[in-house]
Amino acid sequence: MLRHHPSRSDLQTRCSTLAILMFASVAVVGVVSGNAGASMCADTSIGRVVPSADGLRVEQTSVPALHAGDILVQLNSHRLQTCADLAEGLSEARRNKLGTLFLIRRDGEVEMALVPAPVAQAAPAEPTAIPPPPVPTSPPTPLSRADADAARQLLAEFVAFGRDLQARQPLPMAQPWAQRVEQLRQRYNSQQARGAAVGLIEPILGYYETVAQVLLYKETVTRERRDIRARGDVVLEYHSNSPVPAWVQRYPFLRPSVLQEPDIGVLRVGESNGQWLPDRAVALLLDRAITEGTALSSTLAAGAPG
């Protein structure tokens, strides 16, 4: 009986096939292991946070106000359901140098945990071995009914104002709306002393203050074109030094209001203006203020003791 001895080319082919199979197996294992770790939220600056059936759970943290096992319910005005919600809330706090006020669920109770914004320290003239003071933190405190009621009462005014503006869109004039936003600011400032929970409303108030700024800007730019102010499809030109880019940078959800960004070409002298929909920006701001205000009110109602 004759035996077949594989040629050198056959052996090379078999080795190549085996190598491909091994590489594919390693790749599959890598994909599976990568997916297993993909559920952890990206670097959050507060520690290791993972989504769970109960919500965003803190697994490890160096922040004194938070403990492993805490469920993050809300950050400032951002209701936390996904890692993206947490990332957006932390990014906004860093961008605007705000403290981070969390609503957390711990052992079945809803509490507040405040991490103040770091205070900027002047650089010393000479190197020093003395470490800088730590960023102060506040331990979680139970959410009292009085705190929750004060915040919810103010939220009701904010949401009602937003719905009033929505019903009157497009808004051709800045007044009396800018004046009413200033009154909301005064009302908010007077209520802050009644409880820490009122501080959660600050970002929502920021939406309304931006609405007032947009209306004033629109009125100024269209001062000689009163015939187009009442139209909801007004397209305004803007340049990179106008306040529009700053508004979009602060609130990325305003990007749909930008039709075309300013362009500085290589061979062009100066820049070509961008195009922007001010009434679309106002609508987006109002929708965000009403949605987040309503969600925050529900969270406060559910978290405060009876």
Image: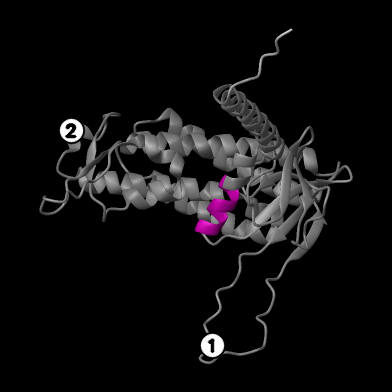
In front: mark 1 or mark 2?
1
- Examine the rendering and report whether any part of residue 178 can be seen: no
Assign the magenta stretch its main secondary structure: helix
Amino acid carrying mark 2 in the image: Asp
| Number of residues whose C-alpha sits closer than 10 Å to that of mark 1, classed few (under 14), some (14–19) or many (20 or more) | few
Q: Is residue 246 left or right of residue 222?
A: right
Measured along the vertical axis of the image, is residue 153 above or below residue 45?
above
Q: Position of residue 252 (x, y in %)?
A: 44, 43
Measured along the vertical axis of the image, is residue 231 above or below residue 151?
above
State the quadrant of the C terminus. Answer: top right
Q: SS for tag 2?
A: helix
- Which region is colored magenta? 88-95
In terms of image quadrants, where is residue 64? bottom right
What number is the disc on residue 227?
2
What number is the disc on residue 124?
1
State the quadrant of the N terminus. Answer: top right
Residue 225 colored in magenta in the image: no
